Amino acid sequence: MKKTILSFLLLLTACELPPRQAQTNTALRTMEATTTEGRTNEEYVMVTTAVTMPMYVNHDQATFKRWGQERGVKVSILGPAEWDVPAQINTIEEVIGTRPAGLLINGTDPAIAPVINKAVAAGIPTVVYDSDIPNSNRHAFLGTDWYEIGKMQGEEMARLLNGKGKVAYMGILGLTNMEDGFRGLLDVFKKYPGIEVIGKYDDKANVEEAARITSDLLAAHPDLAGLCGFDSNSGPGMALSVREAGKAGKVKITTVDWEPEHLQLVRNGVIQMLAGQKRELFTWYGAQFLYDMVHQTNRLSANDAKAGLTNVPYEINTGLIKITKDNVDEFLNKK
């Protein structure tokens, strides 16, 4: 994927920070604030990494913007353009100083736990989405059980291969959510002695890298039977090399996410199954949890903060979507 977009990090002064409403560096935001006249001007901030990734833009960010418009509040989406966890941490650090009404943070890596704790200690309602950060003090988490993503892929691959054949898998190695997914996949394969796992590969969430790895695997293992992908760019990259090798439909592919490109590859028979997350749900309801905390929508005591209570659900599993050639048109035709 060509790296043509500059980092979306805030440039803040070292001492006192100006109010967020007064900041003029709008080029560092992926959207401008939206407000409704006569309603609140409070600001909610989403901080992720790889803010230009189509999956994030089309699902998470589009939903967050729509939520902000519905509620009549300001929303901002910040973070580095590429997959850069240290840069995401720096962005969160800087946003904390601007005192937003709430923080919606993509749980990219366990390393972000300390800065999440700093946000909570500063009294900022903080919700984590996508992948949980267990060692953090976040107020709530909404997302997917990645172990189940791995199991879904493993069970479908075992079915496609009739329980035997060489399989490889790839994703972003070291991330808690993906490692959970890998574990779910391998736990399923343990039940099928005829399935030989030939390797675990880091495609760095990059289409070209996934394609390169796949091309090398096809050259080294002409009898490769299946590929499993765990990040948004795994599937398109694997599909590219499999198709170029003339093995579309012969080498089975299961992967995650359901962007238009993924869906077309399923319709064309290059990818056999997608394990989709309900990203719109964990973004919308994560933002709503922040709003409910700010406005004390559901008070549980005379003083929830003094009682040590968080008045939103602690953890929500938003579930999975299984997409195959049998139902792919329902998603392609979604308005």
Image (cartoon, rainbow, N blue to C red):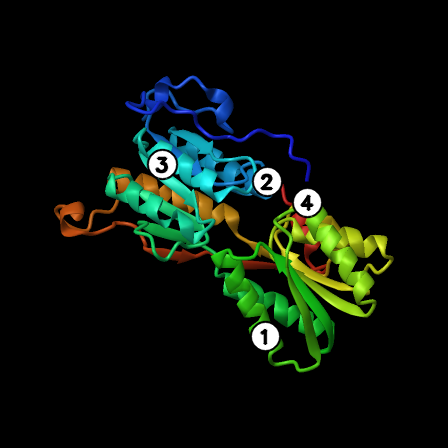
Q: Position of residue 174 (x, y in %)?
A: 52, 57
Q: Amino acid at mark 3?
A: Glu
Tell me where residue 123 sits by quadrant.
top left
Which-is-in-front pick, marks 4 and 1?
Answer: 1
Give the CA separation, mark 1 to mark 3. 40 Å
User: Does residue 268 appear in the picture of this structure?
Assistant: no
In-front residue for pair 220/88: 220
Say which element carries label 4.
helix
Residue under label 2, please give it.
Answer: 53
Q: Amino acid at mark 4?
A: Pro
In-front residue for pair 167/269: 167
Instruction: Please give left or right for residue 287 compared with residue 257 in the image.
Output: left
Q: Are marks 2 and 3 in contact (CB under 8 Å)?
A: no
Q: Position of residue 3 (x, y in %)?
A: 64, 34
Give the CA separation, mark 2 to mark 1. 30 Å
Identity of the residue drawn at 87% across and 57% down: 246
Residue under label 1, please give it.
Answer: 188
Marks 1 and 3, the one that precedes in the sequence: 3
Which-is-in-front pick, marks 1 and 3?
Answer: 3
Which-is-in-front pick, marks 2 and 3?
Answer: 3
Which residue is outermost to the right?
246
Marks 2 and 3, the one that precedes in the sequence: 2
Q: Amino acid at mark 1?
A: Val
Instruction: Please give left or right for residue 25 compared with residue 231 in the image.
Output: left
Say which element carries label 3.
helix
Q: Are marks 2 and 1 in contact (CB under 8 Å)?
A: no
Residue under label 4, please give it.
Answer: 260
Query: Label 4: few (<14), some or many (≥20) within 10 Å?
Result: few
Q: Amino acid at mark 2?
A: Met
Say which element carries label 2.
loop
Residue under label 3, please give it.
Answer: 93
Identity of the residue drawn at 49% across and 25% down: 28
